[in-house]
Structures are given as C-alpha cells and as structure tokens.
Amino acid sequence: MKLDNAAKVFPGQNSKTWSNSFRVCYELNERIDPDILQRALIDIMPRFSCYDVRIRHGFFWYYLELNDNSPVVLPDIKNPCHRIKFNENGKFLFKVYYHGNRIAVDVYHVLTDGHGGAVFLSTLVAQYLRLKGKEIPEGGFVLPVCGNNTPGELEDSFVKNATSKVKYKNSDRPAYHAKGTKMPRHTVNVTSGIIPFDDLHRLSKEKDVTVTEFLAAVMLDVLCKKQLRERKKQKDVSIQIPIDLRRTYDSETLRNFTICLRVKVDPNKGIYTFDELLEQVKYQLRLAKNEKDLNTMITSNMGLERNPFIRVMPLIVKNLAIGISFAITAEACTSSLITNLGAVNIPPEMSMYVNKFIFMPAPGKVNASRCGVATVNNNLVITFANIYEESDIEREFFTSFVKMGLHVKIESNRE
C-alpha cells in the first residue's frame, strides 16, 4: 500500500531525536489487566489492516506491507512519543502501553492522524471491556471487530479531492519561539488541564466563537505577553491548527486526512486585547476553512508528489532534501500548535467505564509547548508536551481559565 500524501514526508523527517507521532490515551475507572489487553489487541488487528503493517522502501518511495508479526502490549514509559525506529517493536508503527488504569497508544503519523488513532484505541478499549464481561456495542469511534476495512477506510482522500486548478501560496514570515532550558534528549514534560466542557463551551458561545477558536486566542494571548516581557524585537505570534477534513469532504478514511491552518498576529501593530485576539482567530480561521480554499492547499501538497522530476528522484535524494528542508524550516513559521480532536464519540454503555481521553502531540523541535485537546464525558482535557524545563506557558494558559471562573484540575509528570 502506498503512503498517503501527508505521510510521504514523515520518514524523511525521522531523526535520532524526533519522530512525527502522537499519543491517544483512555483512563478507565479500573486497573488494566495486561493479559486481557493483549487478547483484545490481537482480536482487533484483522479489522485494521491499514495499521497491521510495516514500512519498507523501494528505489523511489516508501510503502507499507502486511506485517507477519503480532503486536504486543507494553508497560508505559516516562517519555511518550519517543522516536520511532522501523526495526524495533516487531516493526509495527504504533505501540500500545498500559499503566494503572490507563491504556495508551503512541502512533507514528505515517499510519494516520488523531482521528484514526482515536478510532483504533476506542475499538481496542471496547474489545478489552467486552473480554472483561461488559456489554459494549459498536458505534461512533468503536468499529465492529468482525469484517475487513472498507475501501473508503483505506483510501487516500488527498488524492481523491485534490481537484483545484489553483495552488495555495504560503507567504508566512518567521514566527516568535519561546525559549527555555532544554530537557535532556528523549524526555518531555507533560501537563494536562481538565476543564468541564459545558462551562468552556458556554464561555465560547458567549463570545460567539468555537472552543478551538477560544483556546487558540488564549494561547496567542499568553505568547504575545511573554514575548512583550522579553523586550526583544517583536515577531509574529502564530498558532498552527490541524483541521480534520473528513466532514468537509465526506470521507471515512482511517488514514491521514488533516491539513494545518495558521492564525497569527503581528505585535508590532500594537497590544491586542483578548477580545481582539478572539476576533482575529475567528475571522482568520473561518476565512480559510471553506471547501475551495482547503482544496487549493490539498492540491498544492499533491504538487510535489505529481512533479515528474521528483517522482523519478531516488529515495535517498528525496530523504536528504526533506531532512535538510525540515531541519531549516521546522516550525519556523509557528509559535505553537493546538490540535483539537473534539468529542470522542463512544457508546453510552462504554462511557460509564471511562474517566477521560487524552490526546497529546509529540513535543516540538523548537516550539516550547504544543498541545492536544479531546473531550469525553464532559471532561475536556488539554495536554501540553514541552521540550523545556520551564512551565510558565502552561501555568499562564491554565491560569487564564481560572481567572475566567472555570475550574481546572492539573496533572503532570513534572516532579
């Protein structure tokens, strides 16, 4: 199976210190039995043939082929989203972990995006609960265990929908990056804030914005103030926001189908109030989030793959070019990232055994804090992955919500 369009650049970005991956995690209300979890994992793998693979390479491109090994569950580690090595872990591109009452999956982005990872994990947890004697139906993110992937689940939706005659032109300038004391290699500071979704949703509605727009405005506010305190030359503050394209294009793919938008402000124009930042985020996102403009971005991303010169370029040269480009431009135009998975849709019969769902991107190369957001059972969890020892960004971010009257519960792996 060919890599989808989004996945083609990720192997070339892989390094000794970083892989483009993410973590999805369920916290249940009972301790995990690893033996039963192992049985559940084996049970669901035939249903997810697009993940039951290993990565191989030819002369021109990487590709995926069926993995003859069986995946195993592992005790959790202290450094989530650790770099992916293609020849370890039975050559699978995901790892299933357990710890206490948590089940987590670290996923290499070559396989899928956050939506696909959440579907895989939800189906795994549902099967685990069934083996524990619970009556859990299919529905929402829980797929039936029997049967095979449908053609729609396996399709590369980028190829199908790249039909624009106009290509997107990116003219972003280098953005502000918060600095700090770097953590040792292969370690990450993780901080989660749990907020009642209803309360945050009500606050967002009062401001006539979505929850994602509200969170992006808070992050812009925190970073603008931090840069101002540093009394240096002011650069654009830019937030990268991945957008799930499945609803826009009526896709059911379990592979990657996400595109990244940016919202930004120029502090040199003056100090922005929070309400002004809300307006900036609202209009910038909504202006870009229409089918025609998104199509230009998809078509532009397909341009390199369709370029005859690049198609015949040997893979070793492609990887070298991608690696150099990524080393120079990685996150250059973004100050942070917020990726909101939204509501994790699971059957009510399963919800009663679930406390929360955690979604965390890999820590950035230069971005101080990147965060993932997900909601289940009215618990909205915002999880930061930080490459620095300092926690001022997370502290100010969550303090902003407390000042607005919201209750925030903090969990962290910081000592």
Image: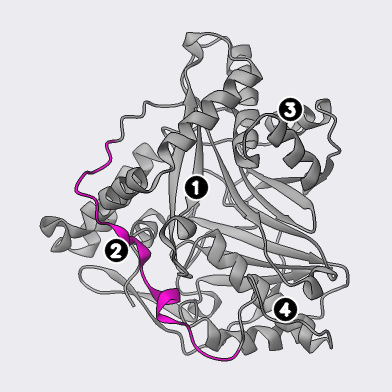
Magenta stretch bounds: 146-169
Q: Residue at x 40, y 44 (%)?
A: 290
- Of the two numbered discs 1 and 4 on the same chain, state the one appearing first in sequence: 4
- Of the two numbered discs 1 and 2 on the same chain, state the one appearing first in sequence: 2
Q: Which residue is mark 3?
A: 396
In the drawing, what numbered circle is on residue 159? 2
Q: Which residue is mark 4?
A: 126
**CA distance for labels 2 and 4:** 32 Å
Which quadrant is the C terminus positioned in? top right
Secondary structure at badge 4 equals: helix
Q: Magenta stretch: dominant SS?
A: loop
In the drawing, what numbered circle is on residue 242? 1
Q: Is residue 348 inside the magenta stretch?
A: no
Q: Are marks 1 and 2 in contact (CB under 8 Å)?
A: no
Looking at numbered disc 4 in the image, what kind of residue is underneath it?
A: Ala
Q: Position of residue 196 (x, y in %)?
A: 81, 46
**CA distance for labels 1 and 4:** 27 Å
Q: Is residue 168 inside the magenta stretch?
A: yes
